[in-house]
Image: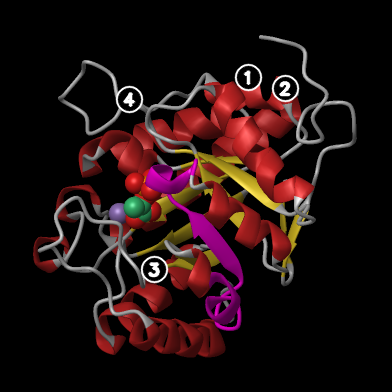
Amino acid sequence: MEELKLTSWTGQARTVVGVGPLRVGAGFTVIAGPCSVENELQLMTIARAVKDAGADALRGGAFKPRTSPYSFQGLGLKALKILEKARQETGLPIVTEVLDPRDVSWVSEFVDVLQIGARNMQNFSLLKEVGKGYRPVLLKRGMYSTLEEWLNSAEYILSAGNPNVILCERGIRTFEVYTRNTLDLSAVPAIRELSHLPIIVDPTHGTGRASLIESMALAAAAAGADGLIIEVHHNPKEALSDQAQALLPDAFSVLVHKVRSVRTCWEGLS
Ligand code: PEP
Ligand code: MN
């Protein structure tokens, strides 16, 4: 890879992103929650369950980037108000995706971390807008993007003035169709070699299959990831988006327990 003098690359101490009391990049951060916020009862049920299971932050989509315009698009403002309520009750910081540069400023008033989804990794106006903002950014890898392209996208945010970027590997498109994407876990040590930014892994979108998530989460921890983002739903069959890949709260709880053991082992060995 060409030697580039970019601020997201190595050459400085590892970045730790503060999200309220959380320190992403120091320790292991588990973010969990539904793909979409569907209603207050659904979100509160899941928020309590992931909190009990040991999650550090709550995710939930208010604006959904759906392949079809006829699929559920998210509840928007209503979802943000529900997420705020969940933070009040559980104390968990909130992560939600923004799709449109015009939403960055007002959505920042409701949530703690702005997620840039895979489909928007090279939406440069959106990157510049979150870069001008004050909220930490969770930048997912584009499904067709190289590590160099991904780091250049991070650079858009950093160079606009926001140093708080968390990278997220969520799988890339390959010829394999059994899994929704191919989770590129080699990205974890590669990014640690190339960049000082924290990197977390999304085994949910990375596999698209609930049965594969725990194994890939453990592998991510063993590879040195700084955390995970995982979709959890108390009734996946009724979920309005991403049904096949949501973990039940009990399965999530087992996963968190195992993943924290692997992390402890990894810290002992490295
Ligand atoms: C999501 O997190 O729900 C999502 C849409 O993820 P991605 O951008 O990785 O597809
Ligand atoms: Mn999803």
Sequence-wise, the earlier of marks 4 and 2 is: 4
- The furthest residue to the top: 1
Q: Which mark is residue 190?
A: 1
Q: Which mark is residue 194?
A: 2
Disc 4 to disc 3, C-alpha distance: 23 Å
Sequence-wise, the earlier of marks 3 and 2 is: 3
* Neighbourhood count class around disc 2 (C-alpha, 10 Å): few under 14, some 14–19, many 20 upward: some
Sequence-wise, the earlier of marks 4 and 3 is: 3
Instruction: Look at label 4 and name its amino acid.
Output: Thr
Label 2, ligand 1: CB separation under 8 Å: no
Q: Are marks 2 and 1 in contact (CB under 8 Å)?
A: yes
Residue at the image position 75 percent from the left and 53 percent from the top? 160
- The quarter of the picture where the N terminus appears is top right
Sequence-wise, the earlier of marks 1 and 3 is: 3
The residue pinned by badge 3 equals 60
The x, y position of residue 52, in whole percent, is 46, 71
Instruction: Look at label 2 and name its amino acid.
Output: Leu
In the rendered picture of this protein, how many numbered marks are placed on residues?
Answer: 4
